[in-house]
Image (cartoon, rainbow, N blue to C red):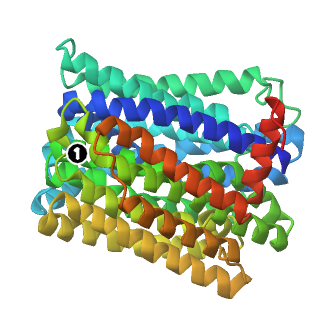
Amino acid sequence: MNSIKRQSLKTFIVEGLGIFIGFFSLLFIYPLGDEIFGYMQFLYSSGNLLIPILGMGIPVALLKFIPYEVQEDKNRFLIKMVIYSFITTLIFVLLFLSFKKYIYHNLDKLDFDIALLQSNEKIIFFTGFVMVQSGILISFLSHFNRIATPSLIRDLGYKLVLPVTVLLFYFGWVPLEFGAKALLFFTIGVFITLLAYSIHQKFITFSLPQKSLKIDFSREILAFMLFSSLGSISSIIAFRIDVIMVGTLISLTGTALYSKILILSNVIEIPGRVLNKTLSPAISNAWSQNNTELIKKFYQNASVNMLAGGIYLFLVLWFIYDDLISISSNPQSFEGGKILFLVLGLGKLIDLATGINNAILGYSPSYKVNFIFILLLGSTNIVLNYFLIQRFDILGAAYSTFIAYLLFNTLKFIYLLVKYKLSPFSLPLMHLILLGAVTFLTLYFIDFGQVYINIIGKPVIISVLVFTGLFYFKISPEFIEICKTYYAKIGLRN
């Protein structure tokens, strides 16, 4: 449990640094080059879409089944997974080449910008393939509770490469096409760095195997890989296809606006990303021991802590949104963004309120049900995005995402409650929602009338109200314990 708390704190610090860099870039750099920013976000999202297709659920399967391997066989299991990823990639390439004309023909009939896809298909493929290899290493490192450093390498690295590339384009030093090369070199650099880190930490060794290596997987592992892959594909379609569809149905400039607001709303889910990364290995281990009581404890505690952080971040961003945009390098490029943020932000809060249900169901014996839910939702979301984008333009993509969060989490909540008697809801969660409502109503009537005072003053008031409520009502004991521990380290006493 202590290692989970340490990794949570370290990951949160990494995410916090990412917030700072992301905010600065969002306000002052990305608006300078909407075209190349939208182009790189489109390529990055398309590469992410290929991860479960090329990888066939291998990163998730590795994290689920590696606890069953004895220490000396863990490297062998990793090698098997890597080799298998090459095989699945080859199969995909052959299938794609066979049906390439048919795919593009049908996308063209639906008014997608197939020229954008055709001109970038190679870079999207190679980017996706390298991302798969990095994902395998990240899952491998997660098993050894190395979570913060991989996040620093991959997530923070992208937040540095993206603004640098936009600036190079803005000053006329590179053409638009350079964005694709920058993205590919970045993904290769991430993989090499992760591999070097794994070797340096001695998690990967090059000792000669004591027995021959056979690429043989049990039916259970193969079935899990297949369902995880299909589930991941549907999940990406359900929650990330919006960026791709905005780019191919509207424009790269539209992608830029949507991506900027998405970056802002993604800040809200940082507590969820932190706890999902740190708790996934523990949940996998708990299921391997059939320890549902521990899983229930993780479920309820994570729900409270994730939503507490999410509510706080949502309130801060909502009440200083207009002030932040007014000091950006190009406020006009954010026109229509506030309603986007509201819809996307509410969707994130729904997701946080239901806790780590995705990891619990995904690593449970009922993981196939998770696939069915995601497949149903992914199919629905494609249809929703297609029609709602045409009806409401960019806002339609936000509506689709909100509906996806609501439906998906409702299905998972009901199933876990009925099947395993697991629920994320507790009395502290109800207190937390009440605290958030009171804070919102209080801030609704406060305006200092000056941009910079609002940017500083409103978050201070929100912080006082939220953190006082957390301590007074003892809503999050874990948060209080972490604060006390680090107060003691810097010389403060209770």
In this picture, is 258 found above or below 295? above
**162 left or right of 13 in image:** left
In this picture, is 17 found above or below 335? above
To which residue does mark 1 refer?
Answer: 257
The amino acid type, in three-letter code, at marker 1 is Leu
**106 left or right of 122 in image:** left
List x then y, in percent, for residue 2.
Answer: 84, 46
For residue 283, what is the image quadrant? bottom right
Is there any visible trace of residue 392 in the rendered image? yes
Residue found at x 36% / y 68%:
402
List x then y, in percent, for residue 413.
Answer: 59, 78
Residue found at x 43% / y 38%:
456
In this picture, is 341 found above or below 416? above
**263 left or right of 222 in image:** left
List x then y, in percent, for residue 276.
Answer: 63, 54
**348 left or right of 430 in image:** left
Q: Nearer the viewer, residue 285 or 89?
A: 285
